[in-house]
Amino acid sequence: MPIAIVTGASSGIGAATARRLAAEGFTVVLSARRADRLAELVTQITDAGGSAVAVPCDVTSDESVAGLAEAVADLAESYGREGGGPDERVSLLVNNAGGALGLDPVEHGSVDDWQWMFEVNVLGTLRVTKALLPLLEASEAGTIVMVSSTAGFIVYEGGGGYSAAKHGMTAMTGTLRLELAGRPVRVVEIDPGMVRTDEFATKRFRGDTERADAVYAGVEMPLTADDVADCIAWTATRPQHVNIDRIVVRPLAQAAQHKVARGPIGRQRPTS
């Protein structure tokens, strides 16, 4: 079974992606800070007949990321000792760990919030990519999927810090693809728009569920974590010579970053 690593796997898009990749036949290395959540997910995946291993990791720590890389290398080596071939190599990295804090205008922006967003979204992705790239290249059929955002190429009021961080991630993705040209590693970017998960908006507003719920108020069927996981799995399972550079995925209700329809879609509206 090929080995896939998913960062930020304890909830939301990361957890959904881990479940989907396990169903696609990957042994999934689940990485996030919350070990208890990872253990629960391992149980879910194995109970469903899949294969998963939990490796707690904080992407803001060089030491922690080094530990992740070592654990993945050990897993691949154990497969080798058992007589595994190319199908058991480290073939996929999903850089999903990230997040947003606050919705302040630039003039009142929190330096601490901006620093956290850069540390997790940009530098965390850099750390993990650097650490695992040698294993991906050694597989001779590697894929790196960067889970960024439409905020990576479009700005909006109150989103300066998050947009700046995701712009940085998008720039890193394009640069990496150029630098890896001629080497056996694909680089894919997934840019979701409005996705309703169990934690993203709540964390952004520091547990204020009322503000978090207001983001999605009246929006018929925002994307789910499973929708994004479906896109990730599709790109990762194309023939190796096919590189899907970028997928931009939004719900039907969201025509653009600033244009969101709130209310029923495709139903007869009352006339009075």
Image: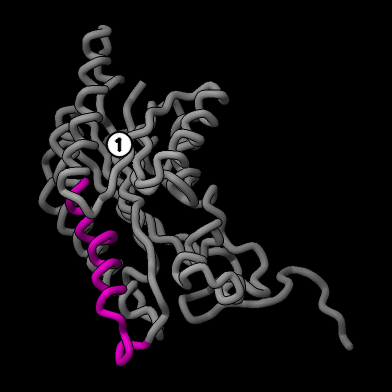
Q: Is residue 126 magenta?
A: yes
Please identify the dominant SS of the magenta region.
Answer: helix
Residue at the spot of label 1? 92
How packed is label 1: few (under 14 Cα within 10 Å), some, or many (20 or more)? many
The x, y position of residue 104, in whole percent, is 39, 84
In this orientation, which residue lies closer to the viewer: 151 or 181?
Answer: 151
Q: Which colour scheme is used?
A: one colour
> Is 203 left or right of 139, judged from the image as shown?
right
Name the residue: 16% across, 41% down. Answer: 131
Residue kind at label 1, given as amino acid type: Leu
Q: Which of 188 and 102 is in front in this view?
A: 102
Q: In which quarter of the image is residue 34?
A: top left
What percent of the width, then of the height, locates residue 267?
A: 79, 70
Which of the 4 quarters of the picture holds residue 264? bottom right
Which residue is drawn at the image coordinates 36% and 76% (left, top)? 154
User: Where is the C terminus found, in terms of image quarters?
Assistant: bottom right
Q: Find residue 150 and report its horizontal and vertical position in percent.
A: 39, 68
- Determine whether, in the image, residue 203 is placed left or right of residue 253: left
Residue 118 vs residue 87, the one in the foreground: 118
Looking at the picture, tell me which residue is in the foreground, 139 or 101.
101
- Residue occupying the point 31% across, 49% down: 95
Quadrant of the image containing the N terminus:
top left
Range drawn in magenta:
105-128
Magenta-drawn stretch contains 158: no
